Structure formats: structure tokens, C-alpha cells
Image: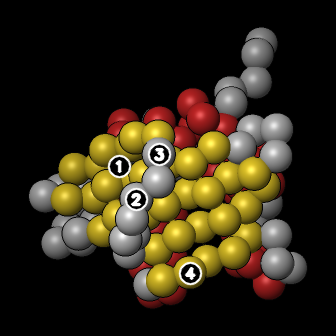
Amino acid sequence: MSEITVREMIFNHEKAFRADIAEGVEAIIQYRLTGEEGGDFIIDIQDGKCKVTEGIHENPTMTLTADGRDFGDVLLGKANGMQYFMMGKLKLAGDLNLAMKLTTFFKMAG
């Protein structure tokens, strides 16, 4: 069985999005991932929908910067995002309240 890539997990945000929990949220989240599984992704949450595109947004609500593999571990539940943040492996800029709620907006893989 092949491993799911970080890119695939990020694009899966569209299917895993929980509009009921993110009700009323309007946000642009920028993922800036480095390393082997790096890339720049824009997560656009508007009108109860989540759209993922590759690229860089000029003025995101929040930016998350991490090594692609580390972030993949967080998405898979193999690592704790808060611990990675405290260790400096995951950096956040912008709306930190949004960052705290972000994981609740998506059904976890599994």
C-alpha cells in the first residue's frame, strides 16, 4: 500500500471540511511547507465551503509554516500540533485563535 502524500492530504481538506463546525468562518489559510514534501497551499474557507489551491496568497488570515513531513504527521495524528508549535517545528502567524480551531474544521484521516 502506498503512503498518502502531504499534498494529497491537503487537497483532501475539501472533502473533509465540516461546514457545520466552521459555520460563519471566513478565512484564508496559507500553508508554507518546506523540505521533500514542501509546497505552498491556500486553504480558502468562505460561505460554508473549503477550496484548496496551490500558490501564495498576498494577505492570508493565518500562515502555517512547517516541514512538509512534520505537517503530514500532524495531519495523520502521528504528532501533536501544539507540541510541534512549542518545539518550533510548526510556526504560525496571523490569527492564532483560528489556528486553535482549525483542526476541528476537518474530519481526521483514518
| Type of the residue with mark 3 | Gly
Residue 17, numbered label: 1
Reading the image, the residue beneath label 4 is 93
Q: Residue at x 66, y 65 (%)?
A: 65
Above/below status of 35 relative to 3? below
Cα gap from disc 4 to disc 1, whole angstroms: 22 Å
Nearer to us of marks 2 and 4 is 2
Q: Looking at the rendering, which quadrant does residue 8 occupy?
A: top right
Q: What element carries label 4?
A: strand
Which is nearer the N-term, disc 3 or disc 4? 3
Nearer to us of marks 4 and 1 is 4
Q: Do the residues labelled 3 and 2 touch (CB within 8 Å)?
A: yes
Q: Residues within 10 Å of mark 4 (few under 14, many from 20)?
A: few
- In the picture, the quarter occupied by the N terminus is top right
Nearer to us of marks 2 and 1 is 2
Nearer to us of marks 3 and 4 is 3
| Type of the residue with mark 1 | Phe
Reading the image, the residue beneath label 3 is 55
Cα gap from disc 3 to disc 4, whole angstroms: 17 Å
| Type of the residue with mark 4 | Ala
Residue 73 visible at all: no
Residue 57, numbered label: 2
Q: How crowded is mark 2: few (under 14 residues within 10 Å), some or many (20 or more)?
A: some
Nearer to us of marks 1 and 3 is 3
Q: Which residue is drawn at 53% across and 42% down?
A: 10
